Amino acid sequence: MKKLYIIGAGSVGGHLALNIEQYNTSYKIEGFFDDDPDKIGTSQFGFSVAGDVNAALKLKEAFIAVGIAFPEVKKQIVEKLSRNSSLKFPSFVHQKAWVSSKVEIGKGTVIYPGTSVNYGSEIGEFVVINMNCALGHHTKVGNYVSLAPGVLTGGHTKISDEVEMGIGASTIQNIEIGKGAVIGGQSMVTTNIPENKVAKGVPAKF
């Protein structure tokens, strides 16, 4: 069985730790690494927090899950961990998610239960797709994206790198959301959203 270490002893990391057998039975959780000094040396979700991210850099030939939703924080941590070329970042798709054939999923991505990903879609690296999302055909999701529970996308939606979409946010078909944009919960995106904009409402405005 492969030893898996989780970066981040918060909600995403805890979900993986408590439910790893529902994602992939070939991994065994060894513990957490977290930069919060109050967590180091404690037990979180039944597993010890061995140290900070710098300590994780010392691992050799280890499997790592980055259990963090926030795009900017996650990107910084991944870039730091990438200095150690022996670390491996598998993706995790819950057994109760539905992923069509003709779908690409990048490394380090976590897809929660109840999610549906239709054909022709491309999911980038280190993406978190939370519970009960539904991605229409040919949806493209960039790297370090965070989709909260219940996000829905129309076909041919393009979600660029480091986007955050809140609970229940939706798009119509052929929408493009620019890098670093934030879409508020329950919003309906009917027009393209530029980079680094915050948009909310029905229809979503920034």
Image (cartoon, helix red, strand yellow):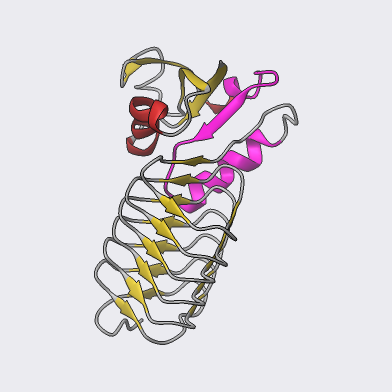
Which residue sits at x=47%, y=84%?
192
Magenta residues span 55-82
Location of the N terminus by quadrant is: top right
Q: Say whether residue 14 is left or right of residue 159.
A: left
Estimate the x, y position of residue 67 in percent, counting from the top left: 45, 37
Classify residue 201 by image quadrant.
bottom left
Of residue 202 and residue 94, the one placed in the foreground of this image is 94
x, y percent for residue 94: 41, 41
In the rendered image, which quarter contains the C terminus? bottom left
Where residue 196 appears, as percent x and y from the top left, is 48, 71
Residue displayed at 36% across by 44% down? 96
Pick whichever, 160 or 58, lies toward us.
Answer: 160
Residue visible at 72% across and 29% down?
84
Does the magenta segment cover residue 153? no
**Whole-percent x, y for residue 144 in the image:** 53, 53
140 vs 49: above or below: below
- Membership of 56 in magenta stretch: yes
